[in-house]
Image (cartoon, grey):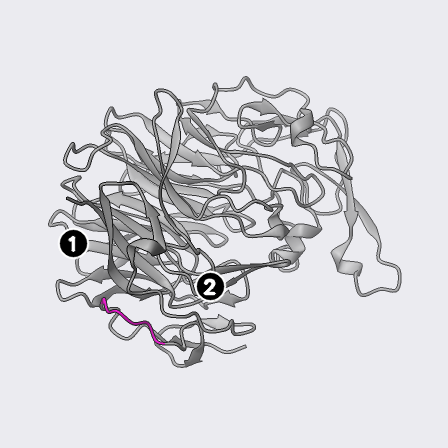
Amino acid sequence: MSHGKCYGQEGWAVSTEIPSSQGLCESDEGNSCALVSSPPPARPRLPVKPEDIVIQRGYALDPVAIGLTFPTSITFDDDGNIYIAEAGYSYGPAKSAGQGRVLRLKPDGSMECIVCGLRGPVTGMAYRGGSIYVAQGGFPGRILRVDSDRKVTPLIEGLRSGGDHFTGDIAFGPDGRMYFGVGSVTNSGVVGVDNFFFGWLAVMPQMHDIPYRTAVLRGANYVSANPFTLNQPVPCTSMTGAYKPFGVPSSPGEIVPGNQMANSVMYSANPDGSDLQVVADGLRNPFGIGFCPCGSLYAMDQGYDARGSRPVSNSPDSMWRIEEGGWYGFPDYVSGLPITLPQFQTPGMPQTEAVLAEPPPLAGEPELRLAAHAASTKFAFSTNPAFGHVGEVFIAQLGSGGPSTGGTAPEGQRVVRANLRNGEVHSFLASRNPGPGGKGPQRPVDVKFDPSGRTLYVLDFGTLEGVPTGVIPYCGSGILWKVRRSR
């Protein structure tokens, strides 16, 4: 395993070529990118021709910055300068050791590192009052403030982030408070062998979901292979209950105390990190959050996967309007519907049971249901008639990680636009070849309008090659694009 700089990052300026060695690393202290096995080099993705992409008529796509490694977030300061967060982490064989970064795009097209060496994954970012607020998703999760003098101040620490899911994006509300979410530790509330292959169960064997509300359990338990015995002649099996460490069963009527430092929650706090409060709970992975022009808080909640001891099939992504004190169904509801319904059962697996004996009342129905395994991430509302579709929401969809997460259909890997009034969803932007060597946005992870609302910026995480065991990420393949009206 090597640590090193990814080729293709020198200067990050826009050009018509990307070095053919993209994805390979050399030893260097500047930007750690450890590859368990180096992926094959990606072919150049620029220039992009109209026949390379599918985009709604009347719009054009332009590259802004290339050579990014695992970018996750963009934000703008008061002067319209663009900031980009690189995660320093990716699912798959490429990991980097504490090298998340916040970069500023300079007028000449090059990048300036505002803060480096952040523990990955860096998952969210927002600008307010001269400072940049950054979410760190590894366990334990943190919220940081980066001031204009580049001083880094931890504001909130000890978040239960870092299992299957992380701390999500950051948004500031009309009330001046800071909002962010923390996803679930597991796929569906039960630790299983899938979490061993995700890489965290072996190093955190006591890790499990913790509810915000006190939970009364039904005693439903799930059997799986014990990954700690896989090297034995006859591997053992273990029985695990919801909200329990791996191998610990639950009992009927058992009470699991609630805790403010929980999973599957939406938080708010003052900008200085004080007065941390839980706004809502029961959200599986509220990675993208934001406020609509009317001031309502929305969250994009990613659906379950068909994996692990408690697999869930055909689970859509959901966009919720968040009500204070609302419960949104995890781990016993799928997009507002009972997890026990036939359409969510996985062939060849036992009937999925509810784990809660006394579930809270649901906060309501989602505003949108999006395709299963689209991996809908972050979103932005259009507000300027010069761009069009005022009031509609544009959503980045990273796409499925492949068969390992239960995704078989090629959903996602595009930007869609949706009308919340009637629930209609339309494809807005996609590459005709979103795989390795293709051109155009491959894995959209964030979308933001510039302060004027005239231009939509699309942050492309880069190449994630789906393989039977998961995904292979390509460092240096991320791109920032912009979408404008064309004549």
Along the horizontal axis of the image, is 391 left or right of 160? left
Along the horizontal axis of the image, is 386 left or right of 261? left
First along the sequence among labels 1 and 2: 1
Disc 1 to disc 2, C-alpha distance: 31 Å
Residue 177 spot, x, y in % from top left: 28, 34
Residue 400 spot, x, y in % from top left: 53, 48
Q: Quadrant of residue 455?
A: top left
Q: Tally the marks.
A: 2
The magenta-colored residue range is 14-19
Q: Amino acid at mark 1?
A: Asn
Q: Amino acid at mark 2?
A: Pro
Image quadrant holding the N terminus, namely: bottom right
Image quadrant holding the C terminus, namely: top left
User: Disc 2 designates what residue?
Assistant: 436
Q: Is residue 1 above or below residue 402?
A: below
In this view, which residue lies farthest toward the front?
Answer: 51
Q: Residue at x 71, y 37 (%)?
A: 346
Instruction: Give me the disc on residue 81.
Output: 1
Residue 13 spot, x, y in % from top left: 22, 68
Question: Could you tell me if residue 73 is visible in this image?
Answer: no
Q: Quadrant of residue 423?
A: top left
